[in-house]
Image (spheres, rainbow, N blue to C red):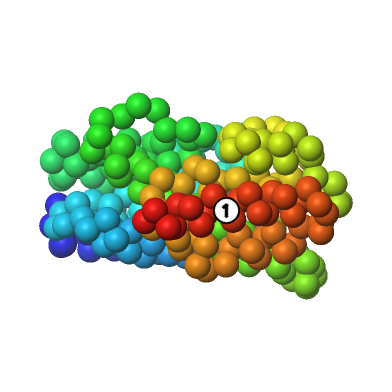
Amino acid sequence: MKKEQLSTFKTWFTEYAATFYTAGDDFLNRNILLKECHTHRVCNEMRQLAGALEMKGSDVLLAEVIALFHDVGRFPQFKQYRTYKDTISENHCLLALRVLAEHDVLAELPDDERVVIENAIEFHGARELPLLDERTMHFAKMIRDADKIDIFDLLAANYRILAEEPEKFLWELEFPDTPECSPEIIDALLNRRLIDYHKIRTVNDAKLLQIGWVYDVYFDWSIKQIHDRGYLETIIDLLPKTEQINQVSCHIMDYVQTRIRSD
Ligand SMILES: [Fe+2]
Protein backbone atom coordinates (compact mmCIF):
# COMPACT_ATOMS: atom_id res chain seq x y z
CA MET A 1 0.00 0.00 0.00
CA LYS A 2 1.20 3.48 -0.85
CA LYS A 3 0.55 6.80 0.85
CA GLU A 4 -1.34 8.08 -2.19
CA GLN A 5 -3.75 5.17 -1.86
CA LEU A 6 -4.51 6.08 1.73
CA SER A 7 -5.29 9.66 0.75
CA THR A 8 -7.55 8.48 -2.09
CA PHE A 9 -9.40 6.32 0.45
CA LYS A 10 -9.72 9.25 2.85
CA THR A 11 -11.25 11.42 0.12
CA TRP A 12 -13.67 8.62 -0.82
CA PHE A 13 -14.67 8.20 2.85
CA THR A 14 -15.37 11.92 3.33
CA GLU A 15 -17.40 12.11 0.12
CA TYR A 16 -19.31 8.95 1.00
CA ALA A 17 -20.15 10.17 4.52
CA ALA A 18 -21.24 13.53 3.07
CA THR A 19 -23.98 11.84 1.02
CA PHE A 20 -25.79 10.86 4.24
CA TYR A 21 -26.29 14.34 5.68
CA THR A 22 -29.86 15.39 5.02
CA ALA A 23 -31.24 18.92 5.33
CA GLY A 24 -33.76 19.23 8.16
CA ASP A 25 -33.00 15.84 9.73
CA ASP A 26 -30.98 16.81 12.81
CA PHE A 27 -31.30 13.40 14.43
CA LEU A 28 -29.77 11.70 11.40
CA ASN A 29 -27.09 14.37 10.90
CA ARG A 30 -26.01 14.27 14.53
CA ASN A 31 -25.60 10.51 14.38
CA ILE A 32 -23.74 10.51 11.07
CA LEU A 33 -21.38 13.17 12.42
CA LEU A 34 -20.83 11.08 15.58
CA LYS A 35 -19.53 8.15 13.50
CA GLU A 36 -17.55 10.35 11.14
CA CYS A 37 -15.71 11.92 14.07
CA HIS A 38 -15.33 8.53 15.76
CA THR A 39 -13.70 7.19 12.60
CA HIS A 40 -11.13 10.00 12.52
CA ARG A 41 -10.29 9.47 16.17
CA VAL A 42 -9.95 5.70 15.69
CA CYS A 43 -7.59 6.38 12.74
CA ASN A 44 -5.53 8.50 15.09
CA GLU A 45 -5.46 5.79 17.80
CA MET A 46 -4.54 3.24 15.15
CA ARG A 47 -1.56 5.31 13.94
CA GLN A 48 -0.35 5.70 17.50
CA LEU A 49 -0.79 1.99 18.23
CA ALA A 50 1.10 1.08 15.04
CA GLY A 51 3.89 3.39 16.22
CA ALA A 52 3.95 1.82 19.68
CA LEU A 53 4.17 -1.63 18.08
CA GLU A 54 7.04 -0.36 15.91
CA MET A 55 5.28 -1.32 12.72
CA LYS A 56 6.79 -0.03 9.54
CA GLY A 57 5.92 1.27 6.10
CA SER A 58 2.93 -0.11 4.33
CA ASP A 59 1.67 -2.01 7.40
CA VAL A 60 1.06 1.31 9.16
CA LEU A 61 -0.99 2.48 6.18
CA LEU A 62 -2.88 -0.81 6.10
CA ALA A 63 -3.75 -0.38 9.78
CA GLU A 64 -5.09 3.09 9.11
CA VAL A 65 -7.21 1.95 6.16
CA ILE A 66 -8.82 -0.65 8.43
CA ALA A 67 -9.62 2.09 10.94
CA LEU A 68 -10.93 4.39 8.20
CA PHE A 69 -13.38 1.80 6.88
CA HIS A 70 -14.24 -0.25 9.97
CA ASP A 71 -17.50 1.61 10.65
CA VAL A 72 -18.40 2.64 7.10
CA GLY A 73 -21.48 0.42 7.41
CA ARG A 74 -22.76 2.68 10.19
CA PHE A 75 -23.88 5.36 7.72
CA PRO A 76 -26.34 3.24 5.69
CA GLN A 77 -27.30 1.43 8.91
CA PHE A 78 -28.43 4.61 10.60
CA LYS A 79 -30.05 6.02 7.50
CA GLN A 80 -32.16 2.90 6.99
CA TYR A 81 -32.91 1.82 10.56
CA ARG A 82 -32.27 5.01 12.57
CA THR A 83 -30.41 3.00 15.18
CA TYR A 84 -26.87 1.73 15.77
CA LYS A 85 -28.11 -1.40 17.51
CA ASP A 86 -27.11 -4.34 15.35
CA THR A 87 -29.60 -6.60 17.12
CA ILE A 88 -32.60 -4.71 15.78
CA SER A 89 -31.11 -3.73 12.41
CA GLU A 90 -28.21 -5.64 10.88
CA ASN A 91 -24.58 -6.49 11.52
CA HIS A 92 -22.69 -3.26 10.83
CA CYS A 93 -19.40 -5.09 10.20
CA LEU A 94 -20.84 -7.12 7.34
CA LEU A 95 -22.62 -4.02 6.10
CA ALA A 96 -19.23 -2.28 5.88
CA LEU A 97 -17.94 -5.07 3.65
CA ARG A 98 -20.99 -4.71 1.43
CA VAL A 99 -20.48 -0.95 1.10
CA LEU A 100 -16.82 -1.42 0.17
CA ALA A 101 -17.69 -4.12 -2.39
CA GLU A 102 -20.59 -2.20 -3.94
CA HIS A 103 -18.40 0.85 -4.45
CA ASP A 104 -15.38 -1.18 -5.57
CA VAL A 105 -13.32 0.75 -3.04
CA LEU A 106 -10.58 -1.81 -2.46
CA ALA A 107 -10.43 -3.11 -6.04
CA GLU A 108 -6.98 -1.75 -6.77
CA LEU A 109 -5.28 -3.28 -3.76
CA PRO A 110 -3.38 -6.56 -4.02
CA ASP A 111 -5.53 -9.51 -2.89
CA ASP A 112 -3.53 -10.19 0.28
CA GLU A 113 -3.98 -6.61 1.55
CA ARG A 114 -7.67 -6.53 0.64
CA VAL A 115 -8.31 -9.80 2.48
CA VAL A 116 -6.58 -8.57 5.65
CA ILE A 117 -8.66 -5.38 5.59
CA GLU A 118 -11.89 -7.28 5.02
CA ASN A 119 -11.26 -9.84 7.75
CA ALA A 120 -10.21 -7.24 10.30
CA ILE A 121 -13.37 -5.24 9.58
CA GLU A 122 -15.64 -8.28 9.56
CA PHE A 123 -14.63 -9.33 13.07
CA HIS A 124 -14.05 -5.96 14.72
CA GLY A 125 -17.42 -6.09 16.45
CA ALA A 126 -17.56 -9.82 17.14
CA ARG A 127 -17.86 -10.94 20.75
CA GLU A 128 -14.61 -12.87 20.38
CA LEU A 129 -12.12 -13.14 17.54
CA PRO A 130 -12.22 -16.38 15.57
CA LEU A 131 -8.99 -18.14 14.66
CA LEU A 132 -7.32 -16.22 11.86
CA ASP A 133 -3.84 -16.39 10.39
CA GLU A 134 -1.22 -14.57 12.42
CA ARG A 135 -0.96 -11.49 10.24
CA THR A 136 -4.72 -10.97 9.95
CA MET A 137 -5.07 -11.62 13.67
CA HIS A 138 -2.60 -8.84 14.40
CA PHE A 139 -4.60 -6.24 12.46
CA ALA A 140 -7.91 -7.58 13.80
CA LYS A 141 -6.63 -7.12 17.36
CA MET A 142 -5.41 -3.62 16.55
CA ILE A 143 -8.76 -2.36 15.27
CA ARG A 144 -10.59 -3.89 18.24
CA ASP A 145 -8.24 -2.08 20.63
CA ALA A 146 -8.27 1.27 18.78
CA ASP A 147 -12.07 1.15 18.55
CA LYS A 148 -12.41 0.31 22.27
CA ILE A 149 -10.16 3.18 23.33
CA ASP A 150 -12.38 5.67 21.54
CA ILE A 151 -15.58 4.04 22.80
CA PHE A 152 -14.20 4.36 26.35
CA ASP A 153 -13.67 8.05 25.65
CA LEU A 154 -17.23 8.49 24.38
CA LEU A 155 -18.74 6.51 27.25
CA ALA A 156 -16.80 8.28 29.98
CA ALA A 157 -17.79 11.68 28.56
CA ASN A 158 -21.43 10.71 28.14
CA TYR A 159 -21.87 9.05 31.53
CA ARG A 160 -20.51 12.23 33.06
CA ILE A 161 -23.06 14.31 31.15
CA LEU A 162 -25.83 11.92 32.24
CA ALA A 163 -24.83 12.38 35.87
CA GLU A 164 -24.09 16.10 35.84
CA GLU A 165 -26.27 17.66 33.12
CA PRO A 166 -28.89 15.06 32.17
CA GLU A 167 -30.80 17.62 30.10
CA LYS A 168 -27.83 17.71 27.70
CA PHE A 169 -27.64 13.93 27.38
CA LEU A 170 -28.46 13.10 23.76
CA TRP A 171 -28.19 9.31 23.63
CA GLU A 172 -31.21 7.14 24.06
CA LEU A 173 -30.91 5.11 27.26
CA GLU A 174 -31.47 1.44 26.65
CA PHE A 175 -31.86 0.59 30.34
CA PRO A 176 -33.27 2.32 33.43
CA ASP A 177 -30.76 4.45 35.32
CA THR A 178 -31.55 2.91 38.71
CA PRO A 179 -28.99 2.05 41.45
CA GLU A 180 -29.05 -1.76 41.01
CA CYS A 181 -25.99 -3.71 39.85
CA SER A 182 -26.50 -7.33 38.88
CA PRO A 183 -24.58 -9.73 41.20
CA GLU A 184 -23.95 -11.98 38.18
CA ILE A 185 -22.14 -9.20 36.36
CA ILE A 186 -20.09 -8.29 39.43
CA ASP A 187 -19.16 -11.95 39.82
CA ALA A 188 -18.10 -12.19 36.16
CA LEU A 189 -15.91 -9.10 36.55
CA LEU A 190 -14.22 -10.47 39.64
CA ASN A 191 -13.54 -13.73 37.80
CA ARG A 192 -12.49 -12.08 34.53
CA ARG A 193 -15.22 -13.73 32.56
CA LEU A 194 -16.76 -12.20 29.46
CA ILE A 195 -20.17 -10.76 30.27
CA ASP A 196 -23.16 -11.56 28.17
CA TYR A 197 -24.90 -8.46 26.81
CA HIS A 198 -28.30 -9.98 27.58
CA LYS A 199 -27.55 -9.89 31.30
CA ILE A 200 -27.69 -6.09 31.41
CA ARG A 201 -30.69 -4.70 33.32
CA THR A 202 -29.61 -1.18 34.32
CA VAL A 203 -27.26 1.60 33.22
CA ASN A 204 -24.97 0.52 36.07
CA ASP A 205 -24.83 -3.00 34.62
CA ALA A 206 -23.87 -1.48 31.27
CA LYS A 207 -21.10 0.54 32.95
CA LEU A 208 -19.79 -2.61 34.65
CA LEU A 209 -19.86 -4.57 31.39
CA GLN A 210 -17.94 -1.80 29.69
CA ILE A 211 -15.33 -1.69 32.45
CA GLY A 212 -14.93 -5.44 31.88
CA TRP A 213 -13.80 -4.73 28.32
CA VAL A 214 -10.30 -4.18 29.72
CA TYR A 215 -10.01 -7.98 29.89
CA ASP A 216 -10.56 -8.05 26.15
CA VAL A 217 -7.84 -5.50 25.32
CA TYR A 218 -4.96 -7.12 23.46
CA PHE A 219 -2.03 -4.72 23.60
CA ASP A 220 -0.52 -3.35 26.79
CA TRP A 221 -0.14 0.03 25.06
CA SER A 222 -3.92 0.19 24.74
CA ILE A 223 -4.44 -0.69 28.40
CA LYS A 224 -2.01 2.07 29.31
CA GLN A 225 -3.99 4.63 27.27
CA ILE A 226 -7.26 3.56 28.89
CA HIS A 227 -5.61 3.86 32.30
CA ASP A 228 -3.66 7.07 31.74
CA ARG A 229 -6.64 8.93 30.28
CA GLY A 230 -8.70 8.12 33.37
CA TYR A 231 -11.60 6.43 31.56
CA LEU A 232 -11.94 3.65 34.13
CA GLU A 233 -11.86 5.97 37.14
CA THR A 234 -14.46 8.22 35.53
CA ILE A 235 -16.88 5.34 34.96
CA ILE A 236 -16.18 3.74 38.36
CA ASP A 237 -16.78 7.10 40.07
CA LEU A 238 -20.23 7.19 38.51
CA LEU A 239 -21.21 3.81 40.02
CA PRO A 240 -22.85 3.45 43.47
CA LYS A 241 -20.35 3.59 46.35
CA THR A 242 -20.93 0.08 47.66
CA GLU A 243 -18.55 -2.51 49.05
CA GLN A 244 -19.05 -4.71 45.99
CA ILE A 245 -18.28 -1.93 43.55
CA ASN A 246 -15.22 -1.08 45.61
CA GLN A 247 -14.09 -4.68 45.31
CA VAL A 248 -14.61 -4.65 41.54
CA SER A 249 -12.76 -1.38 41.24
CA CYS A 250 -9.73 -2.70 43.17
CA HIS A 251 -9.72 -5.89 41.13
CA ILE A 252 -9.84 -4.08 37.79
CA MET A 253 -7.20 -1.54 38.81
CA ASP A 254 -4.90 -4.34 39.98
CA TYR A 255 -5.29 -6.09 36.65
CA VAL A 256 -4.56 -2.89 34.74
CA GLN A 257 -1.51 -2.09 36.89
CA THR A 258 -0.09 -5.56 36.34
CA ARG A 259 -0.43 -5.25 32.58
CA ILE A 260 1.07 -1.78 32.49
CA ARG A 261 4.04 -2.89 34.60
CA SER A 262 4.70 -5.83 32.28
CA ASP A 263 4.77 -3.45 29.30
FE1 LIG B 1 -15.90 1.90 15.68
Amino acid bearing label 1:
Asp
Q: In x, y percent, where is residue 109? A: 16, 44
Relative placement, left or right, of 144 versus 83 is left
Report crowding for label 1: few under 14, some 14 to 19, many 20 or more residues within 10 A (C-alpha).
few
Outermost residue, top side: 131
Which quadrant: the C terminus?
Answer: bottom left
Q: Mark 1 points at which residue?
A: 254
Q: Where is residue 37 in the image (x, y as percent from the top left)?
A: 47, 65
Location of residue 160 in the rendering, given as x and y in whole percent from the top left corner: 70, 67
Q: What element carries label 1?
A: helix
Task: Tell me the residue at 23%/38% (across/down).
Answer: 135
- Specify whether 139 is left or right of 85: left
Q: Residue at x 51, y 57 (%)?
A: 257
Side of 61 relative to 145 (left or right): left
Q: Quadrant of residue 155?
A: bottom right
Instruction: Say which of 51 and 252 sits in front.
Output: 252
Q: Residue at image x 33%, y 58%?
A: 49
- Residue shown at 60% from the left, 34% from the top: 193
